[in-house]
Amino acid sequence: MAVQIDIAPVSDKAGLQAFIDLAYRLNADDPNWVPPLRAEVKELLTPGKNPFFEHAKVQLFLARRGGRVVGRISAHYDELALAQPREQGMGPGTGNWGMFEAQDEQVARALIERAEEWLREQGMTRVLAPISLSIWEEPGLLVQGHDHPPMVMMGHNSPEYQGWIEALGYEKAKSLYTYDLDVSGGFPGIVERIVKSGERSDRIKVRTVDLGHFDRDAAICIDILNDAWSDNWGFVPFTESEKEYGAKKLKPLILEGANMIAEVEGEPAAFMLALPDLNQRLIHMNGRLFPFNWARILWWLRNPPQAAMRVPLMGVVKKYQNTRLASQLAFMMIEYIRRYTVANHATARSEIGWVLDDNQGMNAIAEAIEAKINREYRLYDKRL
């Protein structure tokens, strides 16, 4: 006889701890799952620490069978996302679920149905999922690339989840790609010529992010991002508090020579961030900083040896989008980052993404530098 599954909202510290701990237990036997730092997960889920809660409502749920925790899910909606145009993927009535882990398909069904019920109670008419928690954090379900670990700030999940979710009537809304790139040698000749042409131009200046003025440069990058991505599918703007929070979280990962701001005629026009793949270290730490892992991370971040790099964010202001200048600035920043990381950190491999499946400009740039898709994340859509 099947044992009943009980779904209950998380309402206290013990429940939150159980919610966090479950992922480590269910994924313990997956060699490609990278345990996130437990303190980071707790901060992500705590109002007053994560500014996402300033404009979003979140409810966490735990599934228990016979008293044992066997699944978890977050149900949430973002007021800023609700205010976006419907044709850009979010919009009025769109809620989300995420932070999804389930021991089996029966548990998955019970959790997702409870999340849908909660979203209906909040007045939502559609669900876009999984998103954990913000579109800027870990959107999408991994459907291709389970055979290798994700890079920093990217998710990983059981391949079984895809079938369980699709069986509940969820259909693909978008695919998000990551691209693997060999950077040990140079790029194709046409890219090199485009870079050299940009270097001869008096209009263009590409400089590194200045850690001595990091808050200033971080604000420049996010302002470019808010402008560059504002018409993109899935876009939700950063608030001022999120700008400050994001800069604080990213600063320890910033290598001064690997992050670029491009200026055209003295005005910021584009940026590109590249982060060392901290997951190379986290995969061995089981999510714990103490007693000694914090020191190991700090030591590694000072000068990460043979570090793979990930480009999580880049943008070109609208003024120059759909012009040759946009791709030229992108190629210049990619090449400068490649030169620096190869020379200073013996980098052989980088990753670009995520990139929307219909972002023709970025997909064309990835193709031009001979990058190959190595992972696909999928966002699903369902009417409620």
Image (cartoon, rainbow, N blue to C red):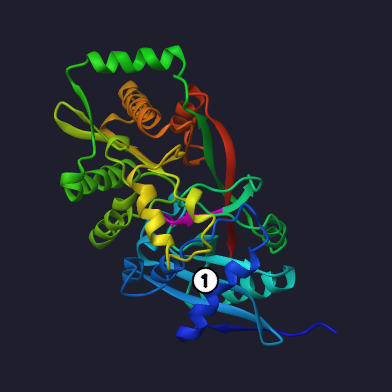
Task: Name, please, the residue furthest toward the front.
Answer: 292
Residue at the (57%, 35%) spot, across then down: 373
Q: Nearer the viewer, residue 272 or 111?
A: 272
Image quadrant for the C terminus?
bottom right
Q: In the rendered view, does 122 fall on the left or right side of 67? A: left
Give the residue at the far right of this rendering.
Answer: 1
Quadrant in which the N terminus appears: bottom right
Q: Is residue 47 above or below residue 247?
A: below
Q: Secondary structure at mark 1?
A: strand
Asked whether 105 or 49 is in front, the reply is 49
Quick check: is 374 in the magenta stretch? no
Q: Position of residue 128 (x, y in %)?
A: 53, 59
Q: Is residue 247 above or below residue 306?
A: below
Q: In the rendering, at what x and y percent does residue 332 appear? A: 33, 24
In the rendered structure, does residue 137 fall within the stretch colored magenta? Answer: yes
Q: Quadrant of residue 51?
A: bottom left
The residue beneath circle 1 is 74
Q: Which residues are magenta?
A: 135-140
User: Pointer 1: residues within 10 angstroms few (<14), some, or many (20+)?
Assistant: many
Q: What secondary structure do most residues of the magenta stretch adopt? A: loop
Residue at image location 28% in from the left, 29% down from the top = 320
x and y percentages locating residue 9 in the rendered image: 53, 83
Residue 256 found in image quarter: top left
Q: Measured from the top left, where is residue 54 in percent x and y?
A: 31, 70
